């Protein structure tokens, strides 16, 4: 009996230490919804690129007008903002349900470690767009997002690390198959988010 009580105490201490060092209120459902937003965004981007009368050429040698680029930027920005708002809202709801603080040392570390690679990649991609090197935009968004996930994963659920690694692999493949950037973008930000979000939801959220 004493040994069993001792093991239970150790397990409880371990859980408390894990909760204090990791932000565990991240919602898996937010990943699913982010994936859905991304698929809708990819569909709109596809129509803009391939059915916009201002775009010319085949899928490998597209000439995209500034107007079409502006539309793509609005689509991408809208998907990003919707995903962030959804993630924050669902994380707050989960934190209230588990009686945890949404803004603590762990969440601050998570945001900082996620933001540094993501902001670096964002500025780098903007420079490439300004130089009209559009073929590298999709691969680099996947790569830098994947690096951000891996970098931040030590401060949240471990599954985020595997999502990041998957994104990095897709980004590298997309760099090799440059003509299929939108397909890899939809696969990464859309399908992978839905798959990993669903896994995290059934693993952590259904209590």
Image (cartoon, helix red, strand yellow):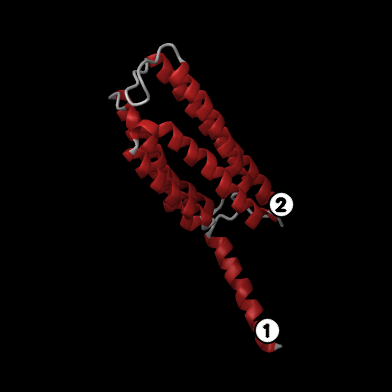
Q: CA distance from mark 1 to mark 2?
A: 30 Å
Tell me the number on the disc at residue 4.
Answer: 1
Q: Give the residue pinned by disc 2.
A: 97
Q: Quadrant of residue 61?
A: top left
Image quarter (top left, top right, bottom left or bottom right) of the N terminus = bottom right
Q: Is residue 88 left or right of residue 165?
A: right
Q: Residue furthest top?
A: 53
Q: Is residue 133 left or right of residue 180?
A: left
User: Quick one: 151 or 53, which is closer to the camera?
Assistant: 53
Which residue sits at x=63%, y=72%? 12
- The secondary element bearing badge 2 is classed as helix
Q: Nearer the viewer, mark 1 or mark 2?
A: 1
Q: Residue furthest front?
A: 58
Is residue 46 depicted above or below 143 in this figure? above
x and y, in percent, of residue 92 in the image: 64, 45
Q: Who comes first in sequence, dot 1 or dot 2?
A: 1
x and y, in percent, of residue 55 in the image: 39, 15
Q: Is residue 21 visible?
A: yes
User: Quick one: 133 or 107, which is closer to the camera?
Assistant: 133
Dot 1: few (<14), some (14–19), or many (≥20) neighbours within 10 Å?
A: few
x and y, in percent, of residue 17 in the image: 56, 67
Which residue sits at x=57%, y=38%? 34
x and y, in percent, of residue 2 in the image: 68, 88
Q: Is residue 116 visible?
A: no
User: Quick one: 85 or 202, which is closer to the camera?
Assistant: 202
């Amino acid at each position: 009996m004493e040994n069993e009580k001792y093991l239970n105490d150790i397990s409880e201490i371990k859980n408390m230490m894990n909760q204090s060092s990791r932000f565990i209120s991240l919602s898996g459902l937010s990943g699913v919804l982010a994936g859905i937003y991304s698929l809708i965004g990819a569909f709109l981007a596809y129509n803009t690129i391939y059915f916009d009368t201002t775009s010319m050429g085949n899928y490998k040698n597209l000439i995209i007008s500034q107007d079409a680029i502006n539309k793509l930027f609005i689509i991408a920005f809208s998907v990003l903002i919707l995903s962030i708002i959804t993630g924050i809202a669902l994380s707050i709801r989960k934190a209230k349900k588990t009686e945890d603080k949404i803004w603590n040392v762990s969440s601050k570390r998570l945001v900082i470690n996620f933001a540094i690679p993501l902001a670096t990649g964002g500025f780098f991609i903007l420079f490439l767009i300004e130089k009209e090197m559009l073929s590298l935009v999709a691969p680099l968004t996947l790569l830098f997002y994947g690096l951000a996930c891996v970098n931040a994963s030590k401060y949240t659920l471990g599954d985020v690390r595997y999502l990041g690694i998957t994104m990095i692999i897709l980004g590298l493949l997309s760099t090799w198959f440059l003509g299929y950037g939108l397909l890899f973008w939809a696969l990464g930000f859309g399908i992978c988010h839905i798959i990993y979000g669903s896994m995290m939801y059934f693993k952590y959220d259904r209590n």
